[in-house]
Image (cartoon, helix red, strand yellow):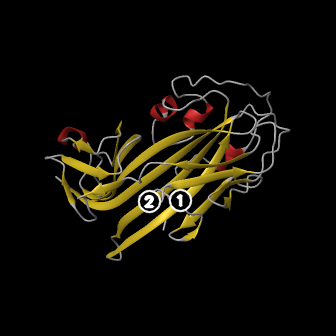
Amino acid sequence: MTRIICLTAISLLLITACSENSTDATGGGKSWFGSILTIVDFDGVIASADTANVNAVLLLSQNYSELRDWDNSSNLTYTEHEATVAFRPTIDSATVITDISVNGTSLAVSSKGAAWGFDSEGLQTYFSTGSTTNTVTKVYSDPALGTIDTSVVFGERVRFSGFNRLDTIDISNGKTIYFTGAGGFMQITVTVTQPDDPEESGGHSLSKVFDGNSTVTLSSGELDDLVSGKADVEVIKYDPKTVTTSSGKKIIFVGRTAHRVSIHLVD
């Protein structure tokens, strides 16, 4: 089962040798933290966050999948949890940053700066109604971040509503899709995994970014570039919070939830 990794490579964790600055203009979301995600334009998230003195971006992801193993005619349902941290490149290379933990699980910053969980094993994330509190702690101080011990409540996880695994989307008719837990900054993707005609040269993916509404319409015009076949549809929600450390530096803590289902795309 292929993991879906939404961050750039672990090289993001390398800290280059420069002097530390106190501010960093976002440049319309195109600053160092504006390019961390690879599947969505990050501008909307950054624009809604307090960016002064930001020295780290911490991404906490919960990915819920209801997929079809087409080759084996079986259904797969699972939840992945992931936390990854990236640091501002202008932090002095002599600064050693350690011991960041999320929900009690160390990100082992000195080695990989990330933690994972699968279903109820390993790192856990909390975005459910009645269980939305996620913690971030850092016991030892350093010039880049200081210490931190705080809890953050993100919004409810995003889920499709009335749209299920093995449903059909007709390209010629378009499709209106509804969600629960909508809000923040959202994106929907359609990816054709097995075209009906393997020789078809048409498009195999579509991405649409939209405000945090509880509904989005994929018009026939938007879908018309896609080929028919077996496909995955995923809705993703980003919810940024800014947390301040003991030294006055800041971390953008982004809660990311996603729901992905396998469907039939027909024309």
Left or right position of 97 against 156: right
38 vs 179, nearest the viewer: 179
Q: Contact, CB < 8 Å: mark 1 with mark 2?
A: no
Q: Which mark is residue 31?
A: none
Q: Which mark is residue 130?
A: 2
Tell me the kind of residue under disc 1: Thr
State the residue lying farthest toward the front: 130
Q: Give how far across and how far down residue 15 sits, in percent.
A: 75, 39
Q: Which mark is residue 125?
A: 1
**SS at mark 2?**
loop
Q: CA distance from mark 1 to mark 2?
A: 13 Å
Front tag of 1 and 2: 2
Q: Give how far across and how far down residue 178 sits, in percent.
A: 25, 50
Left or right position of 233 against 23: left
Left or right position of 60 against 259: right
Q: Give how far across and how far down residue 38 sits, in percent.
A: 51, 42
Determine whether 57 is above or below 74 in the image. above
Determine whether 45 is above or below 182 in the image. above
Determine whether 174 is above or below 266 in the image. above
| Disc with the residue nearer the chain's start (1 vs 2) | 1
Q: Give how far across and how far down residue 134 sits, in percent.
A: 56, 54
Q: Residue 83, located in which quarter of the rendered image?
A: bottom right
How busy is the neighbourhood of tag 1: few (under 14 within 10 Å), some, or many (20 plus)? many
**SS at mark 1?**
loop
15 vs 171, nearest the viewer: 15
Q: What residue is drawn where x is 14% and y is 46%?
A: 172
State the residue lying farthest toward the left: 173
- Residue 66 in view in this figure: yes
- Residue 5 in view in this figure: no
How busy is the neighbourhood of tag 2: few (under 14 within 10 Å), some, or many (20 plus)? few
Tell me the kind of residue under disc 2: Gly
